[in-house]
Amino acid sequence: MKTDHVDSLARGLVVRASSSVEDRQLVAGWLEAEHFLGALRAVGHTLIQFVQQENQVVAVLVWAASAYHLKDRDQWIGWDAITCAKRRNLITNNVRFLVREEHRRPNLASQSLAAALKVLPQQWQEHFGYRPLLAETFTDPELHAGTCYKASGWEALGYTKGHSRHRCDFYIPNERPKRLWIKPLHPRAREWLCAPQLPLECESGQRPEGAGARCALKMKELQSLREALRSIPDPRTAKGRLEFGHFETVKPGEVLDFSLGKSFLFFCWPRKFVRCNDVRKWSHYIFRAVH
């Protein structure tokens, strides 16, 4: 992908963005040599920002996919599990920030961060086709106070539960809770992240309806539901038969009811115009069961 150059007005700093493999490899070498966490294998869309001064790279920022689920972040936005799954791409995570050792001086970190944030939405859109609305990052309170993030306007929301992503077990405990920081990339970011309709420049960052969406029920509720469903005779076997009352055509929103066994009453309503006694077309119906 073509690399873009965007000038910043912050103290002569210039922010250049790239997502090329060559620049990733270059930055990986710098991170291995100078960053206490070393290089990383970023997930999802990954953008690198080179902060330059007088044609010298003085700082590097790596942005990648946001964390899957963060209680404090999701509550601050006002997301439920389904909305989070659909709009998580509109948050980008600052997974690495390095001020190069040979150029370190007072205030350079906060100045570089502010300059990078100013042009991040535009650069991200030019590379991936949509504008993010929120930035997030984490700091280890045992090693860093997060001073540069606070100085550049980030808000501290709380601490993680102390787990690390693992490709086999997904999450494993590390006993090192991290401090969560967020930074809106637009004055109305919080409002738009919950709005029924996203701004046009953000729409392609939203996942299609149902794609990767989590069930809104909690684990204990899912386990209870599973046990309840197991107690229902399978209508596909010879021992039981599922029958609808005979109706002609039913409009969407009209609620019907039928019994299955003696302990459950099911309510159903069609998603579209169908013959409600056509039990072969399960996808046409929405079901709810009560004792």
Image: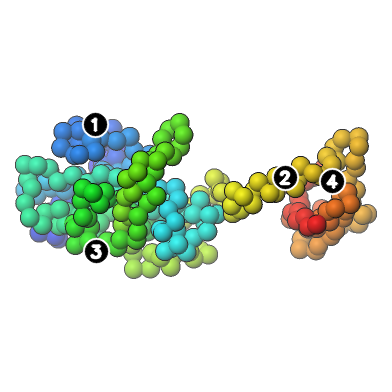
Can residue 211 be spotted in the picture? yes
Report the front residue among 156 and 209. Answer: 156
Report the front residue among 29 and 239. Answer: 239
> Marks 2 and 1: CB-CB under 8 Å?
no
> Marks 3 and 1: CB-CB under 8 Å?
no
Q: CA distance from mark 3 to mark 1?
A: 30 Å
Residue 158: assigned label: none
**Of the two numbered discs 3 and 2 in the rendering, the one whose residue sits closer to the viewer:** 2
According to the picture, the residue beneath numbered tag 4 turns out to be: 279
Residue beneath the point at 25% across and 52% down: 141
Give the amino acid type for the residue marked by disc 1 in the picture.
Gln
According to the picture, the residue beneath numbered tag 1 turns out to be: 25
Can residue 273 be spotted in the picture? no
Instruction: Please identify the quarter of the rendering in which residue 253 is found.
Output: bottom right
Mark 2 crowdedness (10 Å alpha carbons): few <14, some 14-19, many ≥20: few
Q: CA distance from mark 4 to mark 3?
A: 57 Å
Horizontal and vertical percent position of residue 256: 84, 60
**Mark with earlier residue (4, 3):** 3
Give the amino acid type for the residue marked by disc 3 in the picture.
Gly
Horizontal and vertical percent position of residue 171: 43, 39
**Mark with earlier residue (2, 1):** 1
